[in-house]
């Protein structure tokens, strides 16, 4: 119908010609009938336009030029690595972390952002401080006049057996890994809705949200990451009407400075862990750069409520 509308306000029209072969029983005569059906299908707005062959630009749907993106847990490690990838894709990035000062390499990446024609900023915040979290994110949105994306990478880990876990430690795990991710996503979504441009949220989960790790006793951590995966599905269901996409990334074992220290205490894990996936090795933080750009860009414009598991096939055995 001509008055059909959607929250996105965009529809595509198409006409289809169908031909039917009719064989009435018990007659052996055949009849054919053709009908023309016009349909109206809602489509999502794309900020990037297709590039014609021969033009210089390629794969514009991966571009984040002009976008404002937040990355929590980006003072170091995986969060900072993904922040750098988003900068390379053209985004202006705000890194959120509870560290008093970010890691030494942050300044190097910040300088590189200037060379790329964009900016990297740092805001010190603990994601458990909901009032400050909302205040900081709203201030960023007011300054920039928009809010386009979030990578929620803030999280903690603790290796303790289930019989020894305290209620306090369990609550802390869920406050950071689940409630912290939830409240950060909520604060960002409020600004996306306020500006009406939609956006994309990628929350860092883990393959440990799908499996129980052999030889690694982390019941609360694994449960928290399973909660993040389920949270992503539910937020996607609620916020799709605002053109906000929500997905999760589930990494496998990553060799970081923290893991290298773990190998000193548990040297057998250096040999054991690579054998537990199909590629026979551990991953590096750099191998998750593309996932962040993919999920926050128009390259994944029809993807929401999904978990992107990148574990070398660990959970597929």
Image (cartoon, grey):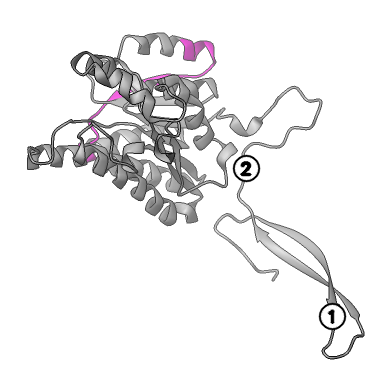
Q: CA distance from mark 1 to mark 2?
A: 42 Å
Is residue 272 left or right of 46 when viewed as pictured? left
Q: Earlier in the sequence, mark 1 or mark 2?
A: 1
- What residue is drawn where x is 47% and y is 44%? 195
The span picked out in magenta is 112-131
Say which residue label 1 marks: 22
Q: Is residue 97 above or below residue 184?
A: above
134 falls in the magenta region: no
Residue 248 in which image quadrant = top left
Residue 305 can be seen, yes or no: yes
Name the foreground residue: 317 vs 221: 317
Q: Residue at x 80, y 63 (%)?
A: 15
**Where the C terminus falls, by quadrant?**
top left
Instruction: Give the residue pinned by disc 2.
Output: 46
Q: Which image quarter: residue 103?
A: top left
Q: Is residue 127 magenta?
A: yes
Residue 41 spot, x, y in % from top left: 67, 60
């Amino acid at each position: 119908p001509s008055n059909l509308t959607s929250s996105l306000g965009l529809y595509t029209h198409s006409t289809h010609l169908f031909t039917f072969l009719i064989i009435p029983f018990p007659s052996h005569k055949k009849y054919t009938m053709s009908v023309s059906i016009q349909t109206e299908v809602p489509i999502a707005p794309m900020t990037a336009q297709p590039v014609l062959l021969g033009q210089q630009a390629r794969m514009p749907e991966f571009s984040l030029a002009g976008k404002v993106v937040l990355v929590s847990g980006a003072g170091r490690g995986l969060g900072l690595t993904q922040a750098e990838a988003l900068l390379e894709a053209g985004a202006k990035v705000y890194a959120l972390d509870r560290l008093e000062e970010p890691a030494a390499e942050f300044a190097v990446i910040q300088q590189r952002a200037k060379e790329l024609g964009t900016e990297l900023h740092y805001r010190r915040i603990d994601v458990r401080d909901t009032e400050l979290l909302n205040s900081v994110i709203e201030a960023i949105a007011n300054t920039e006049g928009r809010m386009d994306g979030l990578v929620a990478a803030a999280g903690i880990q603790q290796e303790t057996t289930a019989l020894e876990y305290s209620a306090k430690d369990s609550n802390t795990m869920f406050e950071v890994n689940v409630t912290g991710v939830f409240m950060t996503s909520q604060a960002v979504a409020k600004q996306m809705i306020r500006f009406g441009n939609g956006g994309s949220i990628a929350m860092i989960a883990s393959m440990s949200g799908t499996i129980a790790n052999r030889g690694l006793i982390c019941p609360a951590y694994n449960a928290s990451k399973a909660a993040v995966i389920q949270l992503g599905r539910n937020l996607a269901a609620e916020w799709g009407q605002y053109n906000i996409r929500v997905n999760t990334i589930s990494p496998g074992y990553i060799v970081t400075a923290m893991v290298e220290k773990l190998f000193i205490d548990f040297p057998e894990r250096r040999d054991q862990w690579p054998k537990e996936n199909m590629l026979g090795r551990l991953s590096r933080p750099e191998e998750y750069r593309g996932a962040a750009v993919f999920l926050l860009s128009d390259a994944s414009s029809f993807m929401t409520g999904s978990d992107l598991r990148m574990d070398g096939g660990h959970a597929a055995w």
